[in-house]
């Protein structure tokens, strides 16, 4: 048996060094620049308008962190950063990282206070209203919705491939954001028609995104507030990264509304970074739940078993959990 080592403790304790290095690289556009062509360090430094003192350390840190390659003195993207961190590609997920850099990074500095008080540590702590301000600012709303597309794109593709869509004809994504899930489903299954349900300011952004994929003839936007109005009737309802925003009573109310909107045999798909039932392995899901503490007054993440229990309580006759990709899984309820 080897002697205990402090290496893992130190690596985790100082993990914010690497995280902020990546976030700054996204902010500076490193990966978008290198998507055009590999560049030597000095050329890259000048294109990014960086001071010469630490540019080399910055670029080589990204190499050591696995975010860049370097061959013959020239830096280039890895296959992952080229696909997911180039702003010009539809697979760009950096919008969520941009939001993390702009907002979450500093608010997570108050996690200890949040754990002691149980109160959010974001703009509300300073007398602001992030979501209220967000929906009144079209540019900020677009950036936020793009970040939601980014964090959900892998799960959305997996849902389009794994769920038995051939058994259904229509679907609606509740809290649809920019429309990433609706587009993936409709693009993969030409027999389906569907739409997105969200607050009215989301509509123009949703439809512009849908039109960019030439799917506006099959996907529509339905404006509404899911706490104030009935949910649209359809064969399949989807809720992605929605339930974790709310307290237990609100979670159950949304599930009940979904049950009432579905026909017999209809399905509810709920996907999140579900915490594993033993609460030991999915660190991302558990940390996302801590993020709900930072951001919201009652939100929390949950296990697949938790969610299946709420679905059965609402009346769903069948439930199951399926892994999607990375930390994300979906709960399926059949009415």
Image: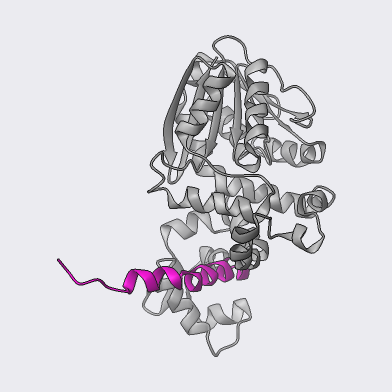
Q: How is the image coloured?
A: one colour
Q: Is residue 233 visible?
A: yes
Q: Looking at the image, which is closer to me, 168 or 316?
A: 316
Image quadrant in which the N terminus is located: bottom left
In percent of the image, x 61 and y 37: which residue is there? 243
Residue 207, image x, y percentages: 74, 36
Q: Count the marks: how many?
A: 0
Q: Describe residue 325's horizontal placement relative to residue 206 as left or right.
A: left
Q: Position of residue 91 (x, y in %)?
A: 54, 49
The answer to whether residue 62 is left or right of residue 218 is left
Q: Visible in this render: residue 214?
A: no
Residue 20 lies in the magenta-colored region = yes
On screen, residue 140 versus residue 157, left or right, reads right
Task: Reply above or below: 220 against 300.
Answer: above
The outermost residue toward the top is: 264
Res 224 quadrant in image: top right
Magenta residues, start to end: 1-29
Q: Position of residue 290 (x, y in %)?
A: 56, 53
Report the residue that reaches farthest toward the right: 136
Q: List the single residue furthest toward the bottom.
A: 53
- Image coordinates of residue 276 in percent, x first then y, are 41, 41
Query: Which SS type dominates the magenta stretch?
Result: helix
Task: Judge by depth and name the residue closer to the eye, 197 or 229.
Answer: 229
With respect to residue 134, does 34 lie above or below?
A: below
Residue placed furthest toward the front: 116
């Amino acid at each position: 048996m080897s002697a205990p080592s402090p290496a893992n403790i130190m690596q985790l304790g100082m993990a914010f060094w690497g995280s902020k290095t990546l976030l700054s690289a996204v902010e500076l556009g490193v990966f978008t620049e290198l998507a055009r062509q590999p560049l030597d360090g000095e050329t890259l430094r000048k294109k990014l308008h960086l001071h010469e003192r630490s540019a080399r350390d910055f670029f080589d840190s990204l190499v050591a962190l696995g975010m860049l390659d370097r061959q013959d003195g020239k830096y280039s993207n890895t296959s992952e950063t080229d696909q997911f961190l180039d702003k010009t590609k539809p697979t760009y997920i950096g919008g969520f990282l941009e939001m993390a850099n702009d907002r979450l990074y500093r608010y997570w500095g108050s996690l200890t206070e949040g754990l002691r008080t149980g109160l959010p540590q974001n703009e509300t702590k300073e007398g602001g209203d992030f979501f209220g301000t967000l929906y009144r600012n079209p540019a900020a709303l677009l950036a936020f919705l793009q970040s939601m597309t980014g964090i959900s794109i892998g799960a959305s593709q997996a849902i389009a491939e794994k769920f038995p869509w051939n058994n259904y004809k229509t679907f609606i994504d509740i809290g649809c954001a920019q429309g990433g899930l609706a587009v993936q489903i409709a693009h993969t299954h030409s027999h389906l028609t569907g739409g997105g349900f969200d607050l009215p300011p989301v509509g123009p952004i949703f439809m512009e995104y849908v039109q960019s994929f030439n799917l506006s003839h099959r996907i529509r936007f339905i404006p509404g507030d899911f706490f104030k109005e009935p949910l649209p009737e359809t064969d399949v309802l989807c809720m992605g990264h929605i339930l974790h925003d709310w307290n237990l009573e609100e979670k159950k109310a949304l599930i009940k509304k979904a049950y009432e909107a579905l026909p017999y045999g209809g399905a509810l798909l709920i996907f999140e970074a579900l915490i594993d039932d033993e609460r030991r392995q999915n660190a991302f899901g558990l940390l996302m739940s801590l993020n709900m503490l930072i951001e919201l007054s009652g939100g929390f993440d949950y296990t697949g078993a938790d969610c299946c229990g709420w679905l059965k309580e609402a009346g769903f006759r069948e439930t199951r959990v399926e892994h999607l990709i990375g930390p994300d899984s979906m709960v399926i309820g059949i009415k």
